[in-house]
Image: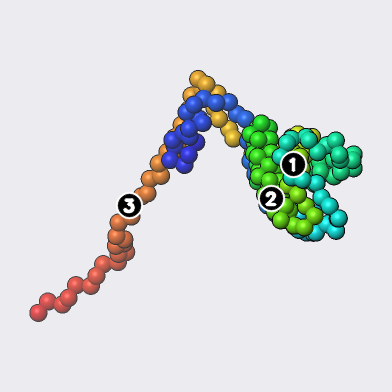
Amino acid sequence: MQRDGTRTRDERSGARTRNRPATAVHRPLRTAGLAGLTCHLALVLWLVVLRPLPVPWVYDTNLTPLASLRSSTGWQVVGEFLLLAPLGVLLPLAGGRLRAPWLPSFLRTTGASALLATGLEFLSSWTPGHVLNVDHILLAVIGVAITHLALVPGLRRLLRDRRPRVRVPVPAPGAAPAPAPAPKVTALVGPPVARARAYAEPTPPAR
C-alpha cells in the first residue's frame, strides 16, 4: 500500500506474500571477482602467452579439433584444462548476479571464455616457440565449463541463503483492500479575538 492509499502492482495482481532476496552480490565480493579476473588474465599473459619458448623446432599449425592429443602428454592436457578454469567462477562473480538461471549463465560464461581463449591463442601465435592450436581453445573452454557447472550453482545458493530477506506483504486473492488513511484536516485559524474587558471605561466629564 502506497502513502496516497493506492495499491501497488503486486497487490492489485493478488500475488501471495513471498520472500524476495536481493539479486546482486555484495560489492566487496564483486570487486574481488573483478580483481581476481584481472590478476588471472595478467598471469596467463605473462607466464604462458607472451613468454618465448626456447625450443629447436615446433609443430605445425593445428586447425583440426583433437588432432594434437595423440602427441600430447597427460600433464599437458591437464594444464590446458586448468589454464582458464578459474574463469568459470570469476566471470559470474564479476557479473554480480545471484538469481540468474543456470543455462543462460552457463552460456554466457562459456561464450566469454571462448572469446578470451581464442584471443589469447591468436596472440600467443606471434610469440616465438608458440603455434596456433585449436585444441588449446577447446580444452580451455571445456575446463571453464566444468568449473562453472561444478561450483557456481552451489556458491550462488549459499550466497542467497546468507543474504537478509525482505518480506513484502501482499494481500491474498479476494481479500478486501486496506482502507485508505483519512485525510488530515487542517483547522483554519482566524485572527485573534479581542478579549472582553473586565472593567468599564471612565466616561468623560460633561462640558
Q: Secondary structure at mark 3?
A: loop
Q: How is the image coloured?
A: rainbow
**Mark found first going from the N terminus, 2 or 1:** 1
Discs 3, 1 touching: Cβ within 8 Å = no
Q: Residues within 10 Å of mark 1 (few under 14, many from 20)?
A: some
Please state which amino acid type lies under the numbered disc 3: Leu
Please state which amino acid type lies under the numbered disc 1: Asn
What is the residue that sits farthest to the left in this orientation? Answer: 207
- On-image quarter of the C terminus: bottom left
Residue found 19% across the figure and 72% down from its top: 203
Nearest the viewer among 52 and 13 is 52
Please state which amino acid type lies under the numbered disc 2: Phe
Nearest the viewer among 89 and 206 is 89
Give the CA distance from mark 2 to mark 1. 12 Å
State the residue position of label 1.
62
| Above/below status of 8 relative to 121 | above
Q: Quadrant of residue 80?
A: top right
| Above/below status of 118 relative to 35 | above
Q: Residues within 10 Å of mark 3 (few under 14, many from 20)?
A: few
Give the CA distance from mark 3 to mark 1. 90 Å
Q: Position of residue 148 (x, y in %)?
A: 75, 38
State the residue position of label 2.
122
Discs 3, 2 touching: Cβ within 8 Å = no
Q: Position of residue 123 (x, y in %)?
A: 70, 53
